[in-house]
Amino acid sequence: MNSEQPEERQDGRPVGRRVFLGTLGLGALGVLTAPVLQRGLEGFLGRVAGKDPTGLTGLLPNGGGFRYYSVAASVPHRTAADYRLTIDGLVDHPRSHTLAELRALPQTRLVRDVQCVTGWRVPGTPFQGVRLSHLLDAAGVRPSAKAVRFTCFDGTYTESLTLDQARRPDVLVALRMQDEDISHDHGGPVRLYVAPMYFYKSAKWLSGITVTDRVKPGYWEHLGYDVDAWVGRSNGRTDEPTS
Ligand SMILES: Nc1nc2c(c(=O)[nH]1)N[C@H]1C(S)=C(S)[C@@H](COP(=O)(O)O)O[C@H]1N2
Ligand SMILES: [Mo]
């Protein structure tokens, strides 16, 4: 796949925008041009839907709200009963956390703009959870460690951060979003939240944190996105950095 695949659904039917992009026959270059192209398509579809009562509206961005993105066709549900977050790799105390254990740890709430690299933004969105640095400190990161790799229970998506990035106070293992428990569609019960970077860094359905000796590029980064995904300073974009 060469573009983000918003599985924007109506009546439970998957309707991937990849159909449109796929028809255009994008090659590797598509990775670089897809954000612009996708915004063009969204603009076009938006104009069509404004006049057209055929139901396209349900497929469209809801006035600056979130889109549902998943690179996996289906994602299993996890609850407090069966959710686990494992921390392993270059740590002295590998372990696995239940949801209750994560909820019992000190919580941090941040309110920032969410910015997807394809151009949509959701201003002032609260996220709350455990600082990643807290979990890393508790696990005892070894001196040879340089980076952190994230895996997801969708079985497909991956992300990474350098250890310095991972230790920032604005990087959370998030349990709540918009002051509610994170819904399944938004990556619940636990997603990563990397406030200063484009939203593709914020891996949904987080299940594994592995401390490594080097950065291993994540899913989209293999397809051309910047590994260091600072808002406004990467991916050829100049969005205003979040405040
Ligand atoms: N596991 C997983 N995490 C993911 C993605 C994904 O496809 N799978 N998409 C990323 C991208 S590109 C964006 S913009 C956001 C979308 O989050 P949302 O679906 O809550 O709006 O999730 C990010 N994290
Ligand atoms: Mo994104």
Image (spheres, rainbow, N blue to C red):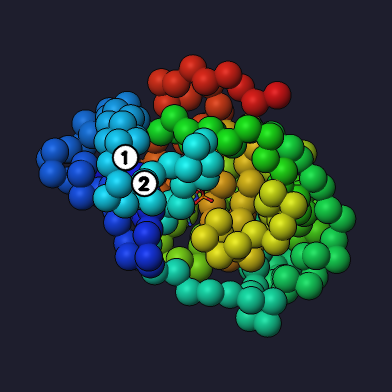
Q: Are marks 1 and 2 in contact (CB under 8 Å)?
A: yes
Q: Mark 2 points at which residue?
A: 57
Number of callouts: 2
Q: Which residue is drawn at 68% across and 51% down?
A: 177
What is the x, y in percent for residue 85?
Answer: 65, 68
Decide which of tag 1 and tag 2 comes sooner along the chain: 1
Q: Residues within 10 Å of mark 1 (few under 14, many from 20)?
A: some
Within 8 Å: ligand 1 and the Cβ of disc 1?
no
Residue 65 in the image: state x and y as whole percent: 53, 41
Judged left or right of residue 61, residue 214 is right
Q: Is residue 200 visible?
A: no
Q: x, y (%) of residue 97?
A: 72, 71
Quadrant occupied by the C terminus: top right
Closer to the camera in the image, 204 or 137: 204
Against 99, residue 195 (above or below) is: above
Mark 1 to mark 2 CA distance (whole Å): 5 Å
**Residue 123 in view of the camera:** yes
Residue 160, position in %: x, y?
A: 53, 46
- Type of amino acid at the residue the image marks with label 1: Ala
Residue ID for mark 1: 49
Q: Mark 2: which secondary structure?
A: helix
| Amino acid type of the residue tagged 2 in the rendering | Thr
Q: In which quarter of the image is residue 80?
A: bottom right
Task: Answer few, some or many: residues within 10 Å of disc 2's Cα (few below 14, many 20 plus, some between 14 and 19).
Answer: some
- Please state which of residues 107 and 61 is positioned toward the viewer in this rendering: 61
- In the image, residue 214 above or below residue 227: below
